[in-house]
Amino acid sequence: MLSGGMLLWPVVARNSVRDIDPKRAIRLINYEDALVLDVRDDSEYAGGHPPNAKHIPAEKIEDRWQELEKFKDKPVVIIFTPGLRVGRAGAVLRKNGFKQVFNLNGGIDTWRRENLPLVKK
């Protein structure tokens, strides 16, 4: 069973969404033109979000992922509210051909704690 699990791990790992820290997220944004995808609800997004973030609430990602089609070959950093089931958003993107999907570890709380910029537009 152990060897079978080891053989399956590359398949599972390839389809999973990795958590990244704020420093890695900023590098992806600044140097690899990553898309910041905010999957929080409308009121949370309006209360402050990362600059240039694309907003698609998590519960609507399955119907609206096509809006992100042009970013398929770029990194996507998902911003969420801790406790929200963010895995679904990443899984939908991976299933539809997005190769580099990352969750910001700790979501918007980490973004705020690191004093990263927020806008309210």
Image (spheres, grey):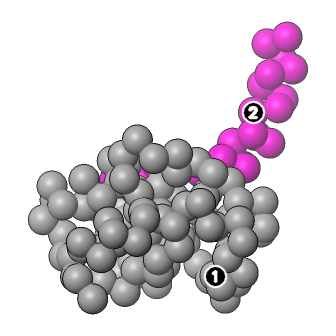
Q: Identify the residue under disc 2.
A: 9
Q: Secondary structure at mark 1?
A: helix
Callout 2 touching callout 1 (CB < 8 Å): no
Please tell me how crowded label 1 is: few (under 14), some (14-19), or many (20+) other residues with Cα within 10 Å. some
Q: Quadrant of residue 119?
A: bottom left
User: Is tag 2's residue or tag 1's residue first in the polypeptide sequence?
Assistant: 2
Asked which quadrant contains residue 94, the reply is bottom right
Residue 38 or residue 29, whichever sits in front? 38
Q: Where 56 falls versus 109 (above or below)?
A: below
The image shows residue 11 at horizontal and vertical percentages of 80, 42
Q: Name the residue: 83% across, 17% down.
A: 3
In the picture, measured across the screen, residue 56 lies left or right of residue 95, that is left
Q: Position of residue 99 (x, y in %)?
A: 68, 66
Relative image position of residue 76 (x, y in whole percent): 53, 70
Question: In which quadrant is the N terminus drawn?
Answer: top right
Task: Name the residue at 66% across, 47% down.
Answer: 16
Evaluate whether residue 77 shows in this view. Answer: no
- Which kind of residue does numbered mark 1 sit on? Leu
The reply to whether residue 37 is in sight is: yes
Q: In x, y percent, where is residue 54?
A: 47, 81
Q: Which range of residues does the magenta coloring cover?
A: 1-21
User: Which amino acid type corresponds to the residue marked 2 in the rendered image?
Assistant: Trp
- Quadrant of the snapshot with the C terminus: bottom left
Which residue occupies the foreground of this view, 113 or 28? Answer: 113
41 vs 10, left or right, is left
